[in-house]
Amino acid sequence: MLGAVPDRYSWSGGEIGFDTYFSMARGNASVPAMEMTKWFDTNYHYIVPELGPNTKFSYASHKAVTEYKEAKALGVDTVPVLIGPVTYLLFSKPAKGVEKSFCTLSLLDRILPIYKEVIAELKAAGATWIQLDEPTLVKDLDSKQLDAFSKAYSELESSLSGLNVVVETYFADVPAEAYKTLTSLNGVTGFGFDLVRGTNTIEHIKSSFPAGKYLFAGVVDGRNIWANDLAASLTILQALEPVVGKDKLVVSTSCSLMHTAVDLVNETKLDDEIKSWLAFAAQKVVEVNALAKALTGTKDEAFFSSNAAALASRRSSPRVTNEEVQKAATALKGSDHRRATPVSARLNAQQKNLNLPILPTTTIGSFPQTVELRRVRREYKANKISEENYITAIKEEISKVVKLQEELDIDVLVHGEPERNDMVEYFGEQLSGFAFTANGWVQSYGSRCVKPPIIYGDVSRPKPMTVFWSKMAQSMTSRPMKGMLTGPVTILNWSFVRNDQPRFQTCYQIALAIKKEVEDLEAGGIQVIQIDEAALREGLPLRKAEHAFYLDWAVHSFRITNCGIKDTTQIHTHMCYSNFNDIIQSIIDMDADVITIENSRSDEKLLSVFRDGVKYGAGIGPGVYDIHSPRIPSTEEIADRVNKMLAVLDTNVLWVNPDCGLKTRKYNEVNPALTNMVSAAKLIRTQL
Ligand code: GLN
Ligand code: ZN
């Protein structure tokens, strides 16, 4: 909309087209894509604007106006939603070549004229309300950043006059200072809050809310799939009514509904009991309406009582509560769980067994998922092939992957994960307390969606989940075979979680289930076990004050999974994002023997931590090449990377591995890339 297209896309101005959009978002043959990153703590991603003093802004996309008109022509008067100007700038970054200290907020005066143009067009098209999203207001902001909001909206005030304008926030409460700034903005007639996650905000509203303004009360959870507690929401709304005035209270969802599943009617396989506990986007809209009607005195008693009955059944269902699990998880809270021997001594004990060369090579777990493999899994699931045939097919695949790794001369092998569709779903399907949707997709980026499992009850592990396959794979080779598990924090963060107990409680339960699996793998003769925590970083709360508490239980959960094993069993963990510098202490505190970690796309951000003197005594494998790209890295390039790591890390802790699993690649990419990776490791070994 603002025409902030980096020069490298050679855009010529005018109305921006899909070709330029796609190049910016996904790259093209000659130009790489822009950075993509997570939108707050959701699984949705946005493309990070690259700005600098020379960025030229122009009104380049009339999408908001065109879509408003399109809906209107169909008889629907919508509220157009724009990202607010300050959030836009705060979520941008200095372009390459621009000073890192460049403050994107300094561009405010240059983008506001375009906002004015858009607003004028919307007004001319007949819009009576518009919504500006300023969710950065829930983050830790300094006074200069808060001032930018006041400045921006004063500047927009005259353009906004004659319109109703709601500034919307979401995903957390709005801190006291930000609340003051927000509710004093000029030109704004309504304020929106997430009252599900932002329970403190309710107190701010009660103690002061500007007279004559609208309150958009987000009482229906847009981030989860549970049916609303209508009676409780109504109580909240009724308490707010006298504060803001009957005609100024708007019932709303806590945030956009793009972060939840779409429609429960598409779930024909979920049983009726669980279904009665849920509300997807379509059902949430009905809840919002029912609450609004109840406020105006036309309460649908039947709807409210069936909601109360569903909630009561959820509370008392024996499928939800497992006393034994509850007790075991509660018992964990106060105490510490940590392997008794320090990591350096453990590594020595392990090395005696494993006898690995220096700079040992390994991969992250998955090997390419071929069309044939997907077919086998699909047909087995649909009962079209027998269990016996399925096992034969998977066994054959594992054997191929093992042979390939032996030929490549990789030191610590993996079985390739051919039996897994997804690293969370695979475990969820075998744990109790989980339900699965057929169509509960949530957009992640572009046309990519994820289908998070639903954790509805206490989690336990009825029987071993991976031991059969890992033992089979180990029997095929004399080299160490990694057992491959998904960690509790990642299972939690990539699921729809219960809202009837704290997240940490659910996480501890999952940790206990994974602990059993770790112990069974060890008993089955597996000497190296990798517990992936790909999503540990992304679960970090939005505000710093809450980081310590989260990291404490998250790291504790990880340690619970392996606190009881022998010194000689080597625990690996893996993480996919390179943004670790701020949580490095917690990573060390996870006390894994080896961590493999994404590194290659991050301009060595990770290595700078060690350059700055952080002591890391455990094994570490910063990824030596990017598996998201079909590009094949050369031996020299990989060797160069490894040498850079050796400059900051000890020779005896460094591992050599790709950035992440190879699932999305093809064998004609994986074979040469891994060949070069092993050659690079061997080359450097001779030079040390
Ligand atoms: N073990 C998983 C794999 O290799 C890890 C995936 C991930 O980190 N996202 O596919
Ligand atoms: Zn990964």
Image: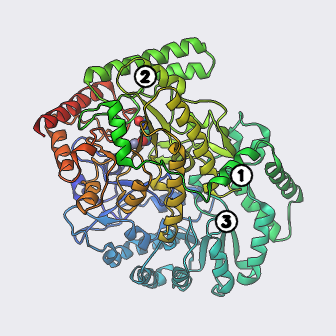
Q: Earlier in the sequence, mark 3 or mark 1?
A: 3
Q: Nearer the viewer, mark 3 or mark 2?
A: 2
Residue shown at 51% from the left, 60% from the top = 552
The answer to whether 76 is drawn above or below residue 90 in the figure is above
Q: Earlier in the sequence, mark 3 or mark 2?
A: 3
Task: Give the residue type that dot 3 points to.
Answer: Ser
The answer to whether 336 is drawn above or below residue 515 in the figure is below
Q: Disc 1 marks which residue? A: 283
- On screen, residue 1 versus residue 81, left or right, reads left
Q: Which mark is residue 252?
A: 3
Q: Earlier in the sequence, mark 1 or mark 2?
A: 1
Helix, strand or loop status at disc 3: strand
Residue shown at 50% from the left, 23% from the top = 469
Task: Give the residue type that dot 1 points to.
Answer: Gln
Q: Disc 2 marks which residue? A: 474
Residue shown at 32% from the left, 51% from the top = 617
Residue 82 x/y as whole percent: 48, 66
Quadrant in which residue 672 is drawn: top left
Render colour scheme: rainbow
Density class for disc 1 (Cα within 10 Å; few <14, some 14-19, many ≥20) is some
Quadrant in which residue 254 is drawn: bottom right
Density class for disc 3 (Cα within 10 Å; few <14, some 14-19, many ≥20) is many
Task: Give the residue type that dot 2 points to.
Answer: Gln
